[in-house]
Image: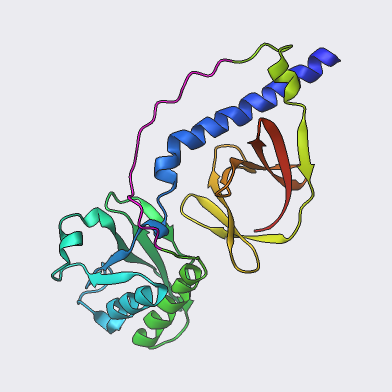
Amino acid sequence: MRYLYNRRILYTMKRYFLLLLLFTTLSGYAQNTINNYKYVLVPEQYSFFKEAHQYGLNSLAKNMLEEKGFTAYFDNKDLPTEIANNKCKALNADLIEKKGMFTTTLTLILKDCQGNVIFKSKEGKSREKEFSAAYNEALRNAFVSLNELPYTFTDEAVKVESVKAPVVVAAPVNSPVAVAAAVVESTEASGTLYAQATANGFQLIDTTPKKVITLYKTSVQDCFIADSGQSKGIVLKKDGKWFFEYYNNEKLVSEGLLIKF
């Protein structure tokens, strides 16, 4: 029984360790959020319209982005030297229209200079019959999910790096490393955290509202790479409950979480 118990511990810790390596490998990309950008470029004509600035939708989008805190420009105007010399410092805003007989539906997309989706809003809908009113209402509704997302420009360079993951050498089953993994510091869940969707997963917000933990999707269901700003680990679901697990001074810490998706 002791042998099987230790093997189970080793298997679990190896899986967690591999997920942490994945987090390190992808961290250069995963940290690419709206907070890395000060500027947004807005098109003067959307692909589903025949004219520039039709229904005033482009100007409305620009104004709402500025209200959010971005510095927005139309993409074919004279741009500041900082952006003209490097458009990767700006996000590109676009709208996607979903055809419907009685409903106007728009989705806001923010992409980086390489075409990666940094933010995708929930669908904004309108049942107004008049086109101008319908498009404006749909756009405002699409902006709701962006406005709910905390934004603070961090002035950090956005970069994509390829990092070669180190070779993982498994510890022998009966080694002190495998046995030490059984030592877990556990804490109960405190306040409820609310999950807000991002391009790569979710961010958990408290009632302040303040971002507490950033979650990044993995290929494992109900298991996320997690970063609280102070600790990096994983958030996973066990027996119907959520836990944030990470190492602190070589001890495995397991914090209970109350998450509302």
Who's the residue at 40% across and 26% down the image? Answer: 164
Q: Is residue 94 above or below residue 179?
A: below
Q: Residue 58: where, in percent of width, then height?
A: 28, 76
Q: Residue 192: where, in percent of width, then height?
A: 71, 61
**Of 241 and 138, which appears nearest the observer?**
241
Q: Residue furthest front?
A: 249
Q: Is residue 179 shown to the viewer in this render? A: yes
Drawn side of residue 183 relative to residue 209, left or right: right
**Of 158 and 248, which appears nearest the observer?**
248
Drawn side of residue 58 relative to residue 35, left or right: left
Who's the residue at 76% across and 47% down the image? Answer: 241
Per the rendered image, the range of residues in magenta is 153-169
Who's the residue at 70% across and 21% down the image? Answer: 10
Q: Is residue 125 above or below residue 169?
A: below
Is 64 included in the stretch rendered in magenta?
A: no
Q: Is residue 239 shown to the viewer in this render? A: no
**Where the C terminus falls, by quadrant?**
bottom right
Q: Residue 183: where, in percent of width, then height?
A: 77, 29
**Of 65 and 133, which appears nearest the observer?**
65
Who's the residue at 33% across and 57% down the image? Answer: 111
